[in-house]
Image: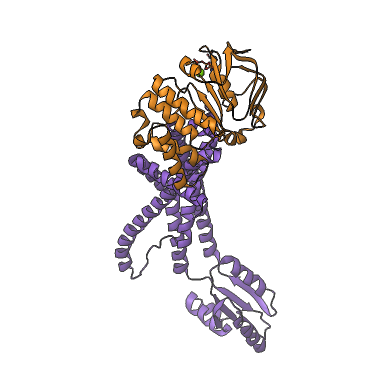
Chain colours: A orange, B purple
Amino acid sequence: MIKFTQVSKRYPGGYEALKNVGFEIEEGEIAFLTGHSGAGKSTLLKLIAAIERPNGGSIVVKGQNVGSLKSGALPFLRRNLGLIFQDHKLLFDRSVFDNVILPLQICGFDHRESAKRARAALDKVGLLAREKANPIALSGGEQQRLCIARAIVNRPTILLADEPTGNLDSAYADEIMSIFKSFHQVGVTLLIATHDENVLRQSDGRRLLLKHGELQP
Amino acid sequence: MSNWLIQHWLVFLFTLRRLLATPVASLLNIAIMGIALSLPVGVYVLLQNVQGLAAQAAGAPQISVFLAKDASKDDVAQTGKRLAQLDDIERIEFVPREQALDQLKHSTGLADVIGGLSQNPLPDAYILYPKTADLKVLEGLRDRLQTWPKLEHVQLDSAWARKLEALLGFVRLAVLILASLLSIALVAITFNTIRLQILTKRDEIEVSKLIGATHAFIRRPFLYFGLLQGLLAGAAAWLIISLSLYLLNRSLAGLAELYASNFTLHHLSAGDSLSLLLFSAYLGWLGAWLSVSQHLWQIEPK
Ligand SMILES: Nc1ncnc2c1ncn2[C@@H]1O[C@H](COP(=O)(O)OP(=O)(O)OP(=O)(O)O)[C@@H](O)[C@H]1O
Ligand SMILES: [Mg+2]
């Protein structure tokens, strides 16, 4: 489903964030990406979604070589991915509901069906009662959950989560993890970057450990 | 209604809301663009009116057909019949040579000189009053008549029409130049409005790209905005001209009474009005399109 072969990423300025990284994640697998701060976890996830481009090696996602994808094809790659960002990337000029429905509008979904799905996603993360609120009025943990609702609303086949439990106490973190597990059960492929020991202890699933941009065996 | 139509309708409503969200700025923009448009269009309207007025004042030009000296009475009658069959002619007047000489005697005061002539030097003539004032048609007609037998000379009294045509051509060119310049200004105004919008919508654009929006999707609301603003500017220009014509006509009414005429200025025709709206909408769209192509690709998600 996701295959890295000898991937390297150098940021402008010369810093080498990833060096010769290779791994493969099978369809329906759940894997955890760990490592110290600055190890390159976010960079790796961004490469999968083609938010950053690799300097070497190949990245294949669902049979497509992401590194050489034309910019016109990017939107259609990203529609298959559910992205949960470390910095949330919520829009504060609209309601919680409008944030969640955005991916469906982008795909040109039927309006009534979209509204139904958006409410279902909000319900899943326990934010249905706040649908009319502005995201700015939500707590850090609630914003995190809103971000998850937006990522799952168009039922992606691959879910990439960057520190999804970063701002949550352990009760909420457990809740989030159980949401992820339910997605795992219906066959969604998950790659979760985290250094939350709690999460790692409670979940079985492959670990990918990064250290200064290199994948540890 | 298809889903595709609903999508566009929603974008349209969204755009309208965006326009109404900053009413003062939108209104000022539309006013500036409307005024800019109303200048060339206003001159065009006056031009149309003057053209009609001038034709009315001058009357249609005439064509004088002088017969050859050796034309017999039969030839004259024959020519008269053929002339009567022409399409573009309203009315024909026959001026026999004797009458022409009489007129010359009385009008010039050369009675003595003319009285001393042993024979009448003037030919029989027909005067044609054409239906049209179109110079091209009349010149074509003259050229055709010149090939007829037993005619000495065909004369189109078109000097005046020519001068008017030249003057109107000059004004038309001026309108065209003005319209071009102000069209560019209109495009520039929209370009800048959209540029500012893109800057304030940076987050939205970035997030939309991250979750799979195509360029077309991101561009659409901005293009709609430009289109709508252009359309409203066209409507504003139309209203400005309506108001101006109303005021001018009111003061003309007094003037016309003095001259016992009932001249009023006419507004743009329905077709011209529609063209104005479509053209201004197109200019708005163009400005938005240029702006979006220029600025959107610069926003890449990180
Ligand atoms: N846009 C960028 N330009 C230059 N350097 C960057 C850029 N983004 C990240 N880096 C560098 O690349 C390295 C890896 O960054 P990355 O964000 O992938 O780390 P991370 O493992 O996600 O860390 P954290 O756990 O703190 O989120 C860091 O040293 C960072 O400074
Ligand atoms: Mg990170």
Residue appearing at x 39%, y 31% in the figure: A92
Asked if residue A3 lies left or right of residue A186, the reply is right
Q: Position of residue A75 (x, y in %)?
A: 57, 35
Q: Nearer the viewer, residue A198 or B13?
A: A198
* Corner quadrant of residue B148: bottom right
Residue located farthest toward the bottom when viewing the structure as drawn: B74
Q: Which residue is drawn at 51% across and 29% down?
A: A83
Vertical order, A168 against B35 (above or below): above
For residue B6, say whether it is visible: yes
**Left or right of A61 on screen, residue B170:** left
- Residue B259's place in the image compared with A145, above or below, is below
Say which of A67 and A186 sits in front: A186
Q: Please indicate, yes or no, whether residue A168 appears anywhere in the rendered image.
A: no
Outermost left residue: B254
Q: Where is residue B239 in the image (x, y as percent from the top left)?
A: 37, 54
Q: In which quarter of the image is residue A131?
A: top left
> Could you say where residue B214 lies in the image, as x and y percent from the top left?
55, 38
Residue B266 or residue B282, whichever sits in front: B282
> How many numbered discs sit on the rendered protein?
0
> B99 or A167, which lies in front?
A167
Which residue: 37% across, 52% down? B240
* Position above or below: A194 against B43: above
User: Which residue lies at the image location 52% right of the left edge and 51% below the top edge?
Assistant: B173
Q: Where is residue A72 in the image (x, y as percent from the top left)?
A: 61, 36
